[in-house]
Amino acid sequence: MNRYGILFFSLFFISTQISAVSYSDYFWDDFKAALDWGRVSPKAQNRFQNFVEEPQEGFGADYHIYGGGAFRSQRGGDDKDQAGKYLGLGQASAQAAFYYRSKSYYLSLILGPRLLAAESKLIEKTVNSVWDGEAVLSLGAEFQNLDFHLEGGRGWQRLDGFGFLFNGMAEFGEVGVSKNKVLSFSLLSLRMKPEEEPLSPKAWNHSRREMWGGNIRSQGILFWENLQFFHYIYREPNFDPSEFKLYPQNVFGHYLYSGMEFRSASFWKDTNLDLSLIRVTGSRKQTAYPWQESEQTTDSFLAYSSLHGNLGDWLLSISGLYTRKDKEERRDSNSDGYAAPLAEPRVLGGYSSFLLYQSVYFPNDRLFYDLLAKKDPGFENKGIQMTGIQIGHSFLPSLRGDVFLNRSHSEMGMGTEMILKLTGNLENTIKGFFTASICYANVDPQKTVVFVTEPFREKSAEKEFWRYYVSAGFKF
């Protein structure tokens, strides 16, 4: 057992799960992130406790219906930037929980179909639909201040609050224990096939991806509001993407993700410090012929920090994101750019930000994939260094406005953007929310164009981009 395994199993005896969340909770991610400085923190409780707020002893049932949608459009740049594209989606889920609870233990089954329809246009218009669902069986026992639980099935998983690691559907098994909802520990195994999400056992076959590992979390202790350590192994299958080759091209990847997530206790009245650090090491092997094998090794990291608080009626934050870049311009045996299985960050404006998601054509791999784009992590990317200032104000108890001023350096070049964002809470009418934003970005490619005739060389012109993003979620 390596040193990480020894650390986690040693801490099991002094600490105790970061729980999975349901797909319906995902409908509210944009809203939660807008109110919590880009963080969507998983709760230190299991699905049953999260879904049924005040369960009675004996047999019981509960249900909820959810709906939502999002629209993203982009303009600007030139033809190769592929910026003139859009995506719109609608989604719905109905969840039902059936349970039996006694004084010391409970058994529950949560079922919920998941429906999604999307229309997008890059070059041609495409329409996609997803028919999926959640089915999670939970068994738990409570002894004094300890809560033990065992869960398994298919459901939505979120492994970190800032979205730098994994946020998606998976078959899973989890065992965990928590103490007073303050200290928690869990071991988790995931199987997923992000590019296919049908209501069928396809994700269990040989082409699935796998993650397993554990995390430790504590809340409201000493000088922190939240502190989490995690260690996960990510494994890609050994399979041929094409079934009709004389010599199959087998691909196999094995990576370790180790990191921590921190939010300080409040100081200066309403000020907090956020910190996220993740390191990834591993390799991906490819076999084109039985006698030929190539290997790409990875050693990279991500760092994010944010200082945020209130100044009178105003909300202020300053944030920074850094990921290591792959130094070579060509593909080689070292791929040291940061990438994750299903990253979906909402910091620095999240999906409202053009500079964060960089939704243009890249010759190299992409750091973060945009809405609904799900592919294997690509470590041949040039990283990103991004800083931002956020200024927010609540005009009404249910209406908030934010301005983001971001600057980044990435494969696109040097970029500056401004985001105007509006977030509304619809609790007074129906249980729901909406967000709407507009982003203007100016990017200097910092490249030189070579011509056959005069002037022979010329600096690439600056580019302008507009990005529009709207999302909403409802609960009935």
Image (cartoon, grey):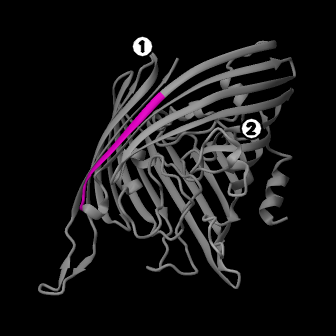
Q: Secondary structure at mark 2?
A: strand
Type of residue at label 2? Gly
Residue shown at 22% from the left, 72% from the top = 460
Most foreground residue, 176 or 286: 286
Q: Residues within 10 Å of mark 1 (few under 14, many from 20)?
A: few
Outermost residue, left side: 454
Q: Which residues are magenta?
A: 68-78
Image location (x, y in percent) of residue 171: 71, 44
- Location of residue 56 by image quarter: top right
Say which residue appears at 58% left-offset and 41% top-offset. 265
User: Taking 84 as reference, is 199 above or below it?
Assistant: above
Q: Amino acid at mark 1?
A: Thr
Residue 311: which numbered mark, if any? none
Instruction: Report the front residue among 322 and 171.
Output: 171
Query: On the rendered structure, is 280 left or right of 450?
Result: right
- Which residue is depicted at the point 36% across and 44% down? 390
Q: Is residue 476 above or below residue 333?
A: above
Q: Which is more foreground, mark 1 or mark 2?
A: 2
Indicate left or right for 304 with 183 as reference: left
Residue, disc 1: 429
**Label 1 or label 2, whichever comes before in sequence order:** 2
State which quadrant residue 425 falls in. Answer: top left
Q: Is residue 77 magenta?
A: yes
Where's residue 178, x and y in %?
78, 36
Q: Is residue 223 visible?
A: no
Residue labelled with disc 2: 153
